Image (cartoon, rainbow, N blue to C red):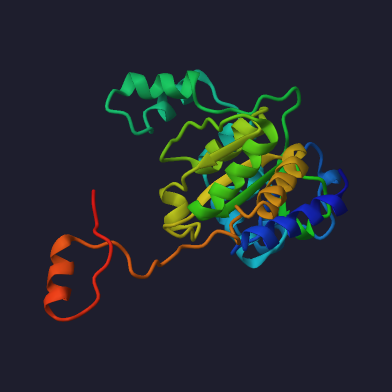
């Protein structure tokens, strides 16, 4: 896949799903020389730190391209999960108490054994983000903020192409991590609910859900969404119906008959 092809897939998804915001393309970086041309550096260019959810918000809402290295972050969890910082055993014990579990030991065990960490032979130095339809790189990951009805079309397209049901594990916190790391580690697709930080500081609406996919699945999913749309089951093709002369309870007909009005079919449970 070329950057041009990736941009075309982004345009197709926007067209078929009527997306409010741009899909977000992500590229992992292993050297500063890989930073795409024109990508804004929050600290270097603006003297600002960003949480990852805020960076996502700027990309999808304002359609800017930006790069997040270690010094740009203002939230601990992406630093930890992407391997931008190292944790010792004391860190695991201390940070493990910060999860929402009644049992502190269960919380610490969750961080040690279940929390998503990037599995890579070489640790990245950060990542670049851009609106998919204008990205000048081939994405490793694509994140789409959309509503449940648009999620349905994405699920239908993915299911049609793969012949598999989607299996997701939901966590109400750390959505930037849970949406991205499992996919970067090899999972094809993922669905995540935005966490409290996304809502309070990342400007995520209450009706939005995060859909993520590996970059190399972009063609597969886009074609699936297009096929579902041509079959009449896409997001733009489905519509609610308002039937007239609908079936009603019996007493409606009795009253209408008394009033000299036309009666109709009876409503039955």
Disc count in the image?
A: 0
Q: Quadrant of residue 33?
A: top right
Camera-side residue: 144 or 220?
Answer: 220
Camera-side residue: 11 or 79?
Answer: 11
Q: Residue at x 70, y 44 (%)?
A: 224
Rendering coords of residue 129 (x, y %):
70, 51
Q: Residue at x 74, y 57 (%)?
A: 12
- Residue 241 in sight here: yes
Residue 58 drawn above or below residue 120: below
Q: Residue at x 77, y 43 (%)?
A: 219
Rendering coords of residue 14 (x, y %):
68, 60
Rendering coords of residue 6 (x, y %):
80, 50
Q: Residue furthest bottom?
A: 260
Rendering coords of residue 166 (x, y %):
56, 33
Q: Quadrant of residue 42?
A: bottom right
Q: Is residue 74 left or right of residue 17?
A: left
Q: Is residue 106 left or right of residue 121?
A: left
Residue 172 drawn above or below residue 18: above
Q: Is residue 37 left or right of residue 141?
A: right
Residue 3 drawn above or below residue 48: above
Camera-side residue: 137 or 108?
Answer: 137
Residue 67 drawn above or below residue 253: above
């Amino acid at each position: 896949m070329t950057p041009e092809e990736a941009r075309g897939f982004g345009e197709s998804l926007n067209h078929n799903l009527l997306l409010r915001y741009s899909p977000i393309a992500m590229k992992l970086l292993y050297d500063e020389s890989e930073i795409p041309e024109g990508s804004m550096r929050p600290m270097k260019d603006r003297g600002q730190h960003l949480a990852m959810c805020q960076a996502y918000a700027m990309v999808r809402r304002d359609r800017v391209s930006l790069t997040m290295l270690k010094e740009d972050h203002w939230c601990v969890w992406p630093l930890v999960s992407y391997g931008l910082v190292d944790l010792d055993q004391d860190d695991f014990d201390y940070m493990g108490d910060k999860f929402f579990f009644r049992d502190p030991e269960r919380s610490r065990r969750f961080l040690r054994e279940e929390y998503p960490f990037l599995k890579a032979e070489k640790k990245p130095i950060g990542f670049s983000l851009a609106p998919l339809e204008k990205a000048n790189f081939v994405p490793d990951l694509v994140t789409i903020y959309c509503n449940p009805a648009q999620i349905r079309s994405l699920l239908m397209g993915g299911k049609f192409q793969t012949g598999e049901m989607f299996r997701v594990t939901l966590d109400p916190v750390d959505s930037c991590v849970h949406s991205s790391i499992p996919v970067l580690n090899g999972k094809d697709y993922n669905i995540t609910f935005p966490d409290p930080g996304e809502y309070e500081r990342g400007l995520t609406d209450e009706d939005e859900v995060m859909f993520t996919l590996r970059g190399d699945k972009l063609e597969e999913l886009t074609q699936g969404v297009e096929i579902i749309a041509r079959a009449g089951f896409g997001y733009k093709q489905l519509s609610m119906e308002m039937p007239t002369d609908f079936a009603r309870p019996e007493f409606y007909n009795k009253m209408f008959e008394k009033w000299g009005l036309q009666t109709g079919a009876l409503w039955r449970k």
